[in-house]
Amino acid sequence: MDTATITLPSTLKLEIDLTDEQFFQMCQKNRNYRFERTASGEVLIMAPTGGETSNRNGRLTQKLFNWVDTNDLGIAFDSNGGFKLPNGAERSPDASWVKIDLWNALTPEQQEKFAPICPDFVVELRSPSDSLKDLQEKMREYIENGARLGWLIDRKNQRVEIYRPGKDVEILDNPESLSGEDVLPGFVLHLQQIM
């Protein structure tokens, strides 16, 4: 039997008309893939990350969950947590956090599916296959939809872009740590195991 090899881009965009429920079910039935959907309805299929990026993302998520365990301010999510943003996009940040009162205002059914909210805090960790431009657009989308703080950690260029509503993006070159500021009071992410 002859075999054929096809090479797909790191992110594949598909034009598929799906209801919210159909999109959710497609994601549930294909857990080996990571899907997002843009505000215009494009379905994005992202390639899994490599071991190095997965390890660093796990450490980042671990640090966020450890901080959450010290207080009752909100709940954290890993990269599998999906959110339906106010603009209609369905996104899954690499790590995120939602204030407890915002989360508790959702019905149990809304909490079970892609929560119809934008997280207060989002992180994207750039993997070698990620387009910096695409991640920057995604970060702006989070802020425009209600995120109060966002970090784009760019390991390739050894820098972090910090996104806040109503402010210019702050760029830090090779920082040692990041502060959760007033959004995540007392949270400090030391970057030696992340960058």
Image (tube, rainbow, N blue to C red):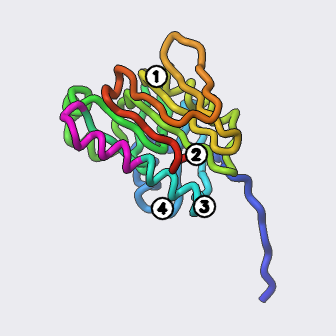
Span highlighted in magenta in the image: 61-73
Q: CA distance from mark 2 to mark 3?
A: 15 Å
Up/down of 162 relative to 90, above or below: above
* Secondary structure at numbered mark 3: loop
What residue sits right under mark 2 in the picture? Answer: 195
Look at discs 3 and 1 and give the one toward the viewer: 3
Distance, label 2 to label 4, CA atoms, is: 30 Å
Nearer the camera: disc 4 or disc 3? 3
The vertical placement of 58 against 187, above or below, is below
Residue found at x 54% / y 30%: 39
Q: Amino acid at mark 3?
A: Gly
Mark linked to residue 50: 3
Which label's residue is closer to the chain start, 3 or 1? 3
Q: Secondary structure at mark 1?
A: loop
Q: Which mark is residue 145?
A: 1
Residue 175 or residue 142, whichever sits in front:
175
